[in-house]
């Protein structure tokens, strides 16, 4: 009844149960945080704008991205993945989401940043619909926890428009 | 002579009972595990609700040996989500982030492009030859939860089968020799 094996088993079971419970509580505590991030994105320049040989439009932008995501960080946050996507509608597609830039923020100290960059991923349309196209720039974030549930949300910034002619 | 035979019978039946009892206990454990797994499949709507991360392509977010909980809801796929997908001709599913989405207006079909956070290039090189986009049927689920390190046991047991046999042997021995 009180052999080494039974005691070891009981101890292990208890330890694992407590660990699982603590992980669950820590993950639940993330819900108490109500973040209020802010962001601003400016399109500084259209570097070039053309129709590729296969018929798809492609544009290159220079962006100025500034954001303050410090309020997203809690004690259970491992990192925040942040990205800026261009979102627009075309006659064929109800939604196009094209990621332009992304970054990984490892700590709260680095969560207030600004960056001046060209698009890291190619801004290519499915087809030739980009001339004079209105689009939104959306800053998305994806909070990756040390353990438990992941959170994601976004800030939509509207009122951007691509030029009428290739350049 | 009669009482000896009776005694032998009683000992035999006792042993059989004990063996049956242990077999039933084992059966209950196995069926409970199966019930829990199948219930998870039903609740999450994903054919494999828990996956172990096998590569470092999503570091530093997910490391090898972490486990992810998947969910397959009716919600359309959006960029930024971490999805698990199957590629024709690849035995192991991949866990990567969606970076581009094009959703058709008339049919609602989606074209999705993915990339691992730690990879410099998008996943077109990993897809089947000539495949440019993932579609809904490739996607097994999206990651909603995360637990570190727990998957290491699985990785060790798949890559070093001897550990698995030793473990099963030791457990079996424990069951046989234990006297409760």
Image: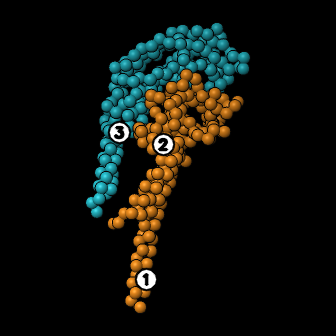
Chain colours: A cyan, B orange
Q: Is residue A97 visible?
A: no
How far apart in space, not on screen, are marks 3 and 1 (Cα)? 58 Å
User: Residue A59 in the image: x percent, y percent?
Assistant: 61, 15
- Residue shown at 34% from the left, 43% from the top: A24
Pointer 3 indicates a residue of which chain?
A: A
Which one is closest to the eye, mark 2 or mark 1?
A: 1
* Residue nearest the observer in this picture, B135 or B63: B63
Q: Position of residue B44 (x, y in %)?
A: 49, 47
Name the residue rendered at 36%, 23% in the picture.
A107
- Density class for disc 3 (Cα within 10 Å; few <14, some 14-19, many ≥20) is many
Q: Secondary structure at mark 2?
A: helix
Pointer 2: what residue? B156
Give the answer, above or below, for where B75 lies relative to A122: below
How many C-alpha atoms fall within 10 Å of the one at disc 1: few (<14), some, or many (≥20)?
few
Q: Circle 1 — which element?
A: helix
Q: On what subunit does the disc labeled 2 rest? A: B
Q: Is residue A134 above or below residue A166?
A: below
Disc 1: host chain: B
Q: Write down the quadrant of residue A141 in the picture.
A: top left
Q: CA distance from mark 3 to mark 2?
A: 27 Å
Residue identified by numbered label 1: B9
- Disc 2 vs disc 1: Cβ atoms closer than 8 Å? no
Query: Furthest residue to the front?
Result: B1
Dot in front, 3 or 2: 2
Residue in the image at 34% along x and 25% along y: A71
In the picture shown, does residue A110 fall above or below B147?
above
In the picture of the structure, the residue carrying the numbered disc 3 is: A27
Q: Mark 2 and mark 1, same subunit?
A: yes
Please name whichever residue, B165 or B31, is drawn nearer the observer in this view of the structure.
B165
Assign the C terminus of chain A to one quadrant of the image: top right
């Amino acid at each position: 009844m009180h052999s080494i094996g039974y005691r070891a088993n009981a101890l292990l079971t208890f330890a694992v149960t407590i660990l699982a419970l603590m992980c669950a509580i820590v993950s639940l505590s993330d819900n108490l945080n109500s973040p209020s991030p802010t962001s601003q994105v400016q399109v500084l320049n259209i570097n070039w704008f053309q129709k590729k040989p296969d018929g798809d439009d492609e544009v290159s932008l220079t962006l100025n991205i500034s954001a303050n995501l410090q309020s997203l960080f809690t004690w259970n946050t491992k990192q925040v993945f942040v990205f800026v996507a261009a979102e627009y509608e075309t006659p064929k597609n109800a939604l196009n989401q094209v990621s332009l830039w992304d970054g990984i923020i490892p700590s709260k100290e680095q969560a207030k940043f600004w960056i001046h960059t060209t698009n890291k991923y190619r801004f290519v349309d499915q087809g030739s619909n980009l001339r004079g196209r209105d689009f939104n720039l959306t800053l998305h974030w994806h909070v990756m926890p040390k353990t438990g549930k992941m959170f994601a949300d976004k800030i939509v910034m509207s009122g951007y428009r691509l030029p009428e002619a290739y350049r | 002579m009669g009482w000896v035979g009776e005694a032998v019978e009683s000992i035999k039946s006792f042993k059989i009972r004990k063996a049956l009892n242990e077999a039933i206990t084992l059966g209950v454990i196995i069926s409970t595990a199966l019930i829990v797994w199948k219930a998870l499949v039903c609740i999450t709507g994903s054919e494999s609700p828990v996956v172990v991360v096998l590569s470092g392509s999503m570091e530093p977010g997910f490391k090898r040996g972490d486990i992810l909980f998947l969910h397959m809801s009716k919600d359309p796929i959006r960029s930024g989500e971490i999805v698990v997908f199957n590629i024709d001709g690849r035995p192991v599913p991949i866990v990567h982030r969606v970076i581009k989405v094009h959703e058709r207006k008339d049919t609602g079909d989606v074209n999705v492009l993915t990339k691992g956070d730690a990879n410099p290039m998008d996943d077109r090189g990993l897809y089947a030859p000539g495949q440019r986009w993932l579609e809904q049927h490739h996607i097994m689920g999206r990651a909603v939860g995360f637990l570190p390190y727990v998957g290491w046991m699985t990785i060790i047991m798949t890559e070093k089968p001897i550990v698995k046999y030793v473990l099963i042997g030791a457990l079996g021995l424990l069951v046989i020799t234990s006297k409760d």
